[in-house]
Image (cartoon, rainbow, N blue to C red):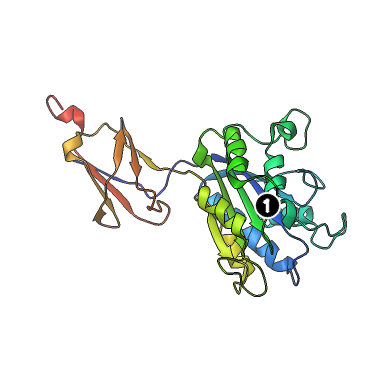
Amino acid sequence: ERVVHAPAWTDGRPLDLFVLVDRTLPDLDAEAVRAGLARMLSSLASQGADYRAVGLIAHGGCAIGGGTVDRSLSTSEGAERLLAQLDLGFARRGPEPMEGSVLWEGGFAMSEVLAGDGECNAWTRPDATKLVVVVAGRDDQSGTSVTAHLEALRERVVAPDHLAYAVVAAGTGGCGGYPEATRLLEVVRETSGRFASICGPDLATTLGSLAFLPGEENQIALPDAPYLPSLEVLVDGRPVEATLDGTVLTLPRSTDRFRDDVEVRFVTAASCPGG
């Protein structure tokens, strides 16, 4: 019997990350944003993401100041560059409100127009998953329906579930004087993304919690092809259903393979006559 322990997956999955912050939010704490961005980058790195990231304001889908953040920078250096691009102190541009163009801004940043050679987002990769992180005090006011918006963006990724939104805004019924972000809630639901309340006590922790790899399958490459009737998969000691394609095992999406202990027991097919 072979036993495989596999708490982690291959490092280096490409992720293009776009961070959008409504700079007109009252009492927006730049230090909390900086700390949250550092936590986000650190979390993505620990999940094996080969990330490239930019910070966007209402500026036609391009980062002001240019330059991307990737793993060649420390997480603190990356957070500092993103913070500069977000220009929370209005040093480079005036306080244009972001809420009217959240979906448009992120969508245009991913468009083929800006991804061409010599364009500001030529750094994006066709095979990369896309994550858009939004911090907004009001709902999106773009004229395009959420469905149409997502249909257009999904043409820019290799699979529909390789696009997701992670949003900090007001949830159902609103909170703290902020109105319910109905369209942003919808885009989170439609992309199986993540949502956190803008009225939470700690923006740094909240931002850090939004880091994930859209569409990630929890897969394990087994060293040998198993004899299928013998295959047993345990997560934290509990049996779970999993699918097998050759020697690649796909676990349930609920499994966090970076924190849960995954144990795979099997007899090799080669050791079983006719197996």
Of 169 and 262, nearer the camera is 169
Q: Locate residue 79, reporting x and y percent.
A: 69, 56
Of 1 and 163, nearer the camera is 163
Position of the N terminus, as image quadrant, is top left
Residue displayed at 67% across by 39% down: 110
Indicate left or right for 59 with 155 as reference: right
| Residue 199 figure quarter | bottom right
Tell me the crowding category of disc 1: few under 14, some 14 to 19, or many 20 or more residues within 10 angstroms, Cα based.
many
Please determine whether, in this image, residue 214 is positioned above or below residue 209: above
| Residue 271 figure quarter | top left
For the view shown, which residue lies furthest in the left direction? 273
Q: Locate residue 3, reporting x and y percent.
A: 25, 44
Residue 203 seen in the current view: yes
Indicate left or right for 156 with 246 as reference: right
Of 21 and 44, nearer the camera is 21
Residue displayed at 29% across by 43% down: 242
For the view shown, which residue lies furthest in the top direction? 274
Please determine whether, in this image, residue 121 is positioned above or below residue 59: above
Of 257 and 144, nearer the camera is 144
Residue 15 seen in the current view: no
Count of number-bearing discs: 1
Q: Locate residue 72, reporting x and y percent.
A: 66, 45
Indicate left or right for 48 with 202 as reference: left
Residue at label 1?
19
Q: Locate residue 132, reporting x and y percent.
A: 62, 49
Residue type at numbered disc 1:
Val
Position of the C terminus, as image quadrant, is top left
Please determine whether, in this image, residue 28 is positioned above or below residue 104: below
Under circle 1, the secondary element is strand
